[in-house]
Amino acid sequence: MKLRVPGLQKAELTALAEIGALNFVGSKVGFHRRDALWQIERASRRAGPLLEGVEESDAAIVEKVESNSANAGEQREEIVREKYSPLEAMTPEARLVSDFRNTGMTVGPHPISYHRADLKRQGVLSARDLLRVANGPRCAWRAR
């Protein structure tokens, strides 16, 4: 991405990665926000003279694994996965926080959806539940 749009700064690329706008760049199934963040970090640092030009292709990695292993499928997936990023995918809550931090909104689930089950256990009525409450009774909510 940096090579295609050289005017983008690292902070801008990081924000794009954090909101999921670069998930397509890896063109790999399962490529996620933290993979994109990892790739931005890799691209922003020089490899140094020892490792310049040593980047192995996916095909070379796959060939090496398949020739040395009985359970090549699992190992291949793990090695290629680590090549793109050793980081776990963001949790839904982390994606929500990242969306709000970078854009002020989210296109994912509503923030209250992450707390709905806990609120229900506490007896807090949802707006939908309030439609079934008869007129007149008080509905109390108490803070923890």
Image: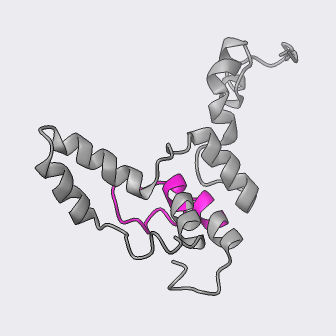
Magenta part of the chain: 15-36
| Magenta-drawn stretch contains 65 | no
Q: Say whether residue 82 is left or right of residue 13.
A: left
Q: Say whether residue 39 is left or right of residue 78.
A: right
| Position of residue 38 measured from the top left corner of the image (x, y, whole percent) | 54, 58
Identify the residue at image location x=67%, y=19%: 118
Determine the residue located farthest toward the front in the rendered image: 50
Identify the residue at image location x=72%, y=53%: 100
> In the image shown, does 7 or 110 lie closer to the viewer?
7
| Position of residue 28 measured from the top left corner of the image (x, y, whole percent) | 34, 60
| Position of residue 33 measured from the top left corner of the image (x, y, whole percent) | 53, 55
Work out whether 29 lies above or below 140.
Answer: below
Quarter of the picture containing the C terminus is: top right
Q: Say whether residue 44 is left or right of residue 65.
A: right
Identify the residue at image location x=17%, y=44%: 72
The answer to whether one can see residue 15 in this image is: yes
Q: Main secondary structure of the magenta part?
A: loop
| Magenta-drawn stretch contains 21 | yes
Work out whether 141 lies above or below 109.
Answer: above
| Position of residue 89 measured from the top left corner of the image (x, y, whole percent) | 50, 45
Q: Say whether residue 88 is left or right of residue 8.
A: left
The answer to whether one can see residue 21 in this image is: no
